[in-house]
Image: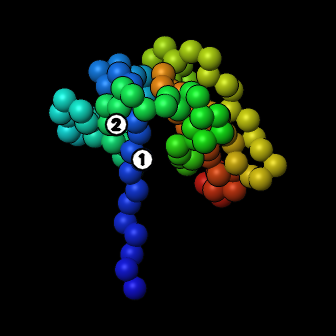
């Protein structure tokens, strides 16, 4: 049987240089490839492909469909502090949810929403 090995989110962005700056400087993604219309970035196991699409409907205008990723992390409170230290504004505080995850969401400059989450059961097992 074939095995799925990884996933990349492909995002349409209005201003590619601004988006590259946000993902690399604020979210600490490494730039793996860059051209006039594309930028591929990665951080640990998360990979993004940003495509310059100045005429696309902005993610900020598509409401609930602007969620692009639910990223599970270790040490979510540490990630939250790290992003705040890099100047990310309006970042909600991580909250423990009844489904066993501790989560916070951010919205990118283009309106894409990313949820970061830590599995509380795994955290309890580690402690």
SS state under label 1: strand
- How many callouts does the rendering have? 2
In the rendered image, which residue does mark 1 sit on?
A: 9
Q: Quadrant of residue 78?
A: top right
Residue at the spot 35% in from the left edge and 31% down from the top edge? 53
Q: Quadrant of residue 27?
A: top left
Relative to 7, 35 lies left or right: left
The figure's colour scheme reads rainbow
Q: Where is residue 74? Give x, y as percent.
A: 54, 45
Residue at the spot 66% in from the left edge and 39% down from the top edge? 64
Q: Is residue 52 among what the camera can see?
A: yes
In this view, which residue lies farthest toward the front? 55
Q: Where is residue 52? Give x, y as percent.
A: 31, 31
Q: Where is residue 21? Give x, y as percent.
A: 33, 21
Residue at the spot 53% in from the left edge and 32% down from the top edge? 59
Mark toward the start of the polypeptide (1 vs 2):
1
Residue at the spot 20% in from the left edge and 34% down from the top edge? 34
Neighbours of disc 2 within 10 Å: few (<14), some (14-19), many (20+): many
In this view, which residue lies farthest toward the bottom? 1
In the rendered image, which residue does mark 2 sit on?
A: 50
Q: Quadrant of residue 6?
A: bottom left
> In the depicted view, which residue is nearer to us: 75 or 63?
63
Mark 1 → mark 2, Cα distance in angstroms:
8 Å
Neighbours of disc 1 within 10 Å: few (<14), some (14-19), many (20+): few
Q: Where is residue 81? Give x, y as percent.
A: 55, 24
């Amino acid at each position: 049987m074939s095995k799925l090995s990884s996933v990349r989110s492909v995002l349409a962005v209005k201003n590619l240089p601004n988006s590259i700056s946000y993902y690399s400087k604020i979210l600490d993604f490494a730039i793996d490839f860059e051209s006039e219309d594309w930028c591929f970035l990665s951080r640990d196991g998360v990979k993004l492909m940003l495509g310059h699409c100045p005429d696309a409907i902005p993610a900020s205008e598509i409401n609930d469909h602007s969620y692009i990723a639910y990223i599970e992390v270790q040490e979510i409170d540490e990630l939250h502090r790290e992003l705040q230290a890099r100047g990310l504004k309006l970042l909600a505080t991580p909250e423990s949810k009844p489904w066993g995850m501790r989560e916070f969401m951010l919205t990118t400059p283009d309106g894409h929403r990313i949820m970061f989450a830590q599995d509380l059961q795994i955290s309890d097992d580690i402690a």
